[in-house]
Image: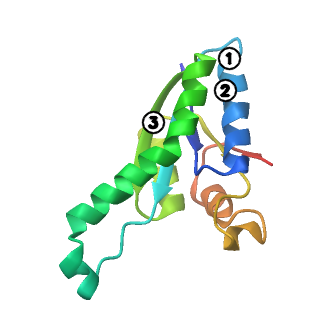
Amino acid sequence: MRKLLVPFDGSDSAMRALEHAIRLARGTEPVELVIVYAHQPPIIYGEIAMYLPEEKAEEVLRAHSEGILQPAIEKAKAAGVSFTSKVLIGEIAKSIVSCAEASGCDGIVMGTRGMSAISNLVMGSVATKVIHLTTLPVTLVK
């Protein structure tokens, strides 16, 4: 069975990429989707660390991340496609590529513009980095 990694950040572009991946998964050859949300590790220092321990910050961030993934999970379930979902913590583009490779994915399907205002100035900076870091085929969905 082929596998496609689909980074999802809640943006319209990410939703269109997921919808494209679902269409591919419904094709003649079975495809499993690996839907991921990647974020930087929390930065806890100084006085903040006294009020919010690192473990608690990670717990809050994980809950937030799972909330962002929820619409993608619901869409994949409703479509009846095979999928798994994961939250990745680390440098975003590297985490996406590492997860795709470790999961045995055959390709990556992602949106061109994410939630970050800076990445919307040009083709998403994460998408650009992923293209340069991976040897897997990358499909960008506008």
Q: Is residue 27 above or below residue 117?
A: above
Q: Secondary structure at mark 1?
A: loop
Label 3 neighbourhood size at 10 Å, few (<14), some (14-19), many (20+)? some
Q: Is residue 16 above or below residue 24?
A: below
Label 2 neighbourhood size at 10 Å, few (<14), some (14-19), many (20+)? many
Query: Is tag 3's residue or tag 1's residue first in the polypeptide sequence?
Result: 1
- Residue 107 percent across, percent down from the top left: 61, 38
Q: Secondary structure at mark 2?
A: helix
Q: Residue furthest bottom?
A: 46
Q: Secondary structure at mark 3?
A: strand
- Residue 48 percent across, percent down from the top left: 28, 81
Q: Is residue 16 above or below residue 22?
A: below
Q: Amino acid at mark 2?
A: Ile
Q: Amino acid at mark 1?
A: Arg
Its colouring scheme is rainbow
Q: Determine which residue is flagged by label 3.
A: 85
Tell me the distance, in whole angstroms, between the alpha carbons under discs 1 and 2.
6 Å
Query: Residue drawn 37% across and 50% down?
Result: 63
Query: Residue drawn 45% across and 36% down?
Result: 85
| Residue 22 disc label | 2
Tell me the distance, in whole angstroms, between the alpha carbons under discs 2 and 3.
14 Å
Q: Determine which residue is flagged by label 1.
A: 26
Front in this rendered view, residue 72 or 102: 72
Tell me the distance, in whole angstroms, between the alpha carbons under discs 3 and 1.
18 Å
